[in-house]
Amino acid sequence: MCGAFSFFDAAGKGEVNMYDVVIIGAGVSGSAIARELSRYDANVCVLEKAEDVCCGTSKANSAIIHAGYDCEPGSLMAKLNVEGNAMMTELARDLDVPFERIGSLVVCTDEAARGGLEELLEKGKKNGVPDLRIIERDELVKMEPNISDEAVAALYAPSAGIVCPFTLNIALAENANVNGVEFRFNTEVFAIRKMGDHFELETGNGTIESKCVVNAAGVYADVFHNMLSSHPIHITPRKGEYYLLDKSAGAHVHHTIFMLPTKMGKGILVSPTVHGNLLVGPTATDQEDREGNNTTREGLADVAAKSALTVKNVPLRSVITSFAGLRAHEDHHEFIIREVPDCEGFIDVAGIESPGLSSCPAIGKMAADIVEKKYGFAKKEHFIATRKGVLNPAKLSMEERNELIRKSPAYGNIICRCETISEGEILDAIHRPLGAKSLDGIKRRTRAGMGRCQAGFCSPRVMEILAREVPGVTMENVTKAGGASKLIVGIDKDAYDTMPENAERAAKSAD
Amino acid sequence: MEHYNIVIIGGGPAGLAAAAAAKKAGEDSILILERDQELGGILNQCIHNGFGLHTFKEELTGPEYAGRFITEVKDLGIEYRLNTMVLSISSDRIVTAMNRTDGMFQVKAQAVILAMGCRERPRGALNIPGYRPAGIYTAGTAQRLVNIEGFMPGKEVVILGSGDIGLIMARRMTLEGAKVKVVAELMPYSGGLKRNIVQCLDDFGIPLKLSHTVVDIEGKERVTGVTIAAVDAQNRPIPGTEEHYSCDTLLLSVGLIPENELSLSAGVALSPRHKGPVVNESLETNVPGIFACGNVLHVHDLVDYVSEEATNAGRNAAAFVRRDGKDDAALPAVEIVPGDGIGYTVPETVRPKIMNDLFTVRFRVRGVYRDHFISVYFDGERVQHRKKQIVAPGEMEQVILQKKDLAAHKDLKKITICLEEA
């Protein structure tokens, strides 16, 4: 995925000889760690092989903030899940991230398996999950009228929530960047060498040196760990396939619905999203390919069939898209967050699969604490703890909106009709810290293209704005998601000569 | 709040014809709201010819056809606002819209004409598995890129779906130097017009594979290939029939859906059959004073019929304003029902008291039928029986009813249109 252009890489910052900390991976873990480290006076850099943050596991998951009853008591997963969940309210407020504590229900569909709910309840209590209780069918049906006729009882966890995973990742990274952390995109790490008291990282954009390396590389974390440690770890990319349904289906359920595993299998979740869609999935298929996030006929059929195990009449005719994500499954199903014993200064943040998103605030804190304790960085005097997201004009009154349009007419120009996203929001997404450079970058920051027409209407318009606003981007080289994902392969044979801006355009793309 | 007697949502072929007709019927207070920077709608990107054979008795390109209506609207002095997106319509016909210069504003209308057109179904609606790289476009998006922006979205193309835009784009991409390798169609028949299959595929040697679909999309960054397979009668892929095509582009022409978000915001009831508003003979929806025409009502294959339908909607809206027709709902109505072999009819009801002397019912058949009769029943009595050599879902059909015939049938409750074997 290493791209041909790298506009913002270390732009204007001059050559840094030696970083204090290099973090590999700008997913939600790497970005959370970067933000925590940005509280200190340290020279921190995040290396990301994709062209943007949130391009791997962090972009394709269930978007759930789990309560924490599912993890083994005493495990790191249990601890960080419950801590991360508790931290999320404040974090979401500080960083302007859509988050709703809607609660979750683990639905038991077999009277004989009811004991499973009790076990989860006990585990949850041991893990310190607040307000857990088992509810009977009557109450369940009142809470969820579309619950399966087979449902007999459920474990209700009011502290569970839903979050926008893109905004969470982007917000953490933006805030880290505002506080001085450098992000280098299109910078894949090929090799890491320990050189006495520091590391040399060989990347697609030259060699980078750092005293400390944090390995937050998702499905690649074992690759980097095994370059340096004689005690290998093993991560399996575990594919999960999902359906995303139209907003017309978003109110089909009001909580995140899980299935209590039975002899019928593990089931899948059915959940509203913070934007009002309905999400159904995931499957779980182990594979070798670390980039193999394709959907399959069998996987999607499985999702469709299993949705009916807990929820009646899921309106699968309203599917607007399907996608797959890869979890970084470590063989022992446990987070590995520690300095590698036989490699001083190399910190693993590995095996971050579900509940990784839920745990990310606590993962960030724990990893940053390990680094800080080791190197004793001083606290920054002027840490900026808050961040404002891309303005959502739909939340404004008509008067406020008109005031906004008077000041900035671009907010009066609707570009994405399905999600009602204006040019003003798209310009904001491009020009803010770590701004968008591609269609997907715009989509994850503004939702333009995420609606029911799936970018059919807005993509040519967004391409034009990107070509106009982003240095080095033209209509001919604008991408879907960086790298080789070019949207245009040439110009019409008879259009070339009639283009008055042709000379200028050619000059611009030669840059 | 501003006030207009008629506000028209959309300045494409339907909106333009409706506006001109309302004006010519004596209505002066008309406003067209158009979201694009020009009037004309989708016709502006339909640069091929074949438009206007019925209306103007000559073959025009899309922009030329639109141009005639745009000139008429301008000559008639009808007001319009460009770059203006309508955000919602209330059931009491307050239209909320937005643009760069006026900001967010509201307009109160006596009558609203819905003329928003339709949109293309995306990949997700078909659950096509595979990767999600660059290079997957709906045919209409590709058409815009090629014909308006002047850019080629791909060089080696596979097209899924044989709707008219897909067929037109097969030819267009070929003329621009791309190689169109195959057009796959899930159904055992094409959804497009026969003339487009001949002129856009056959004339260029592009194969059309009926009862085939895409079962995999390859390419992590840009499309590198697709696999198509034959499907059985339940549209399930048949193992062993897979064929791989290397390509950099997949175009989707897999159906159009009337764009009814605004209709729903006004409380307009939609037909599960044609996905547009349920309307009466005046093309008025269940919400008094809100009319619909063109592709937002039901997807047409010929723009000439859009113009004709919209002309009726414009006249009827003007008549509604003139007679203050808010009590029309009390008039007795006769139901129009799709019988055997018929997918839907537009309209769904007719009120004999205020219908025109001649009245067109448009419909589509459910499948391909040879040597069948199109029949019309007034309750149990067959009143029309017309033989057709072939009918297909891709070609809209019509029957014409006369006011005097309806009047002659006392207590008429139901008009049924159906296909009957010879």
Image: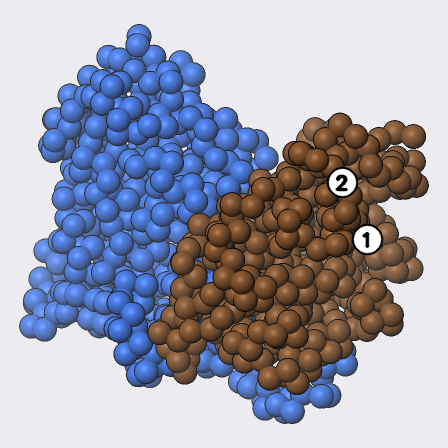
Chain colours: A blue, B brown
* A188 shown above or below A509: above
Disc tally is 2
* B171 shown above or below A474: above
Residue at 64% across, 71% down:
B25
Residue at 23% across, 72% down:
A178
Residue at 53% across, 51% down:
B328
- State how far apart marks 2 and 1 are (Cα): 37 Å
Secondary element under disc 1, as helix, strand or loop, is loop
First in sequence, mark 2 or 1: give its number.
1
In the rendered image, residue B97, in percent from the top left (x then y), is placed at 42, 69
Q: Chain of mark 2?
A: B
Query: Residue A186 is drawn in which quadrant?
Result: bottom left
Closest to the observer, A415 or B301: B301
* Residue type (three-letter) at the residue carrying disc 1: Leu
Closest to the observer, A140 or B179: A140
Residue A209 seen: no
Location of mark 1 (residue): B193
Q: Chain of mark 1?
A: B
Secondary element under disc 2, as helix, strand or loop, is helix
Location of mark 2 (residue): B408
Q: Quadrant of the N terminus of chain B?
A: bottom left
Query: Residue A359 is drawn in which quadrant?
Result: top left
Closest to the observer, A212 or B289: B289
Residue at 64% across, 39% down:
B334
Residue depth check, mark 2 versus mark 1: number of the one nearer the observer: 2
Closest to the observer, B370 or A5: B370
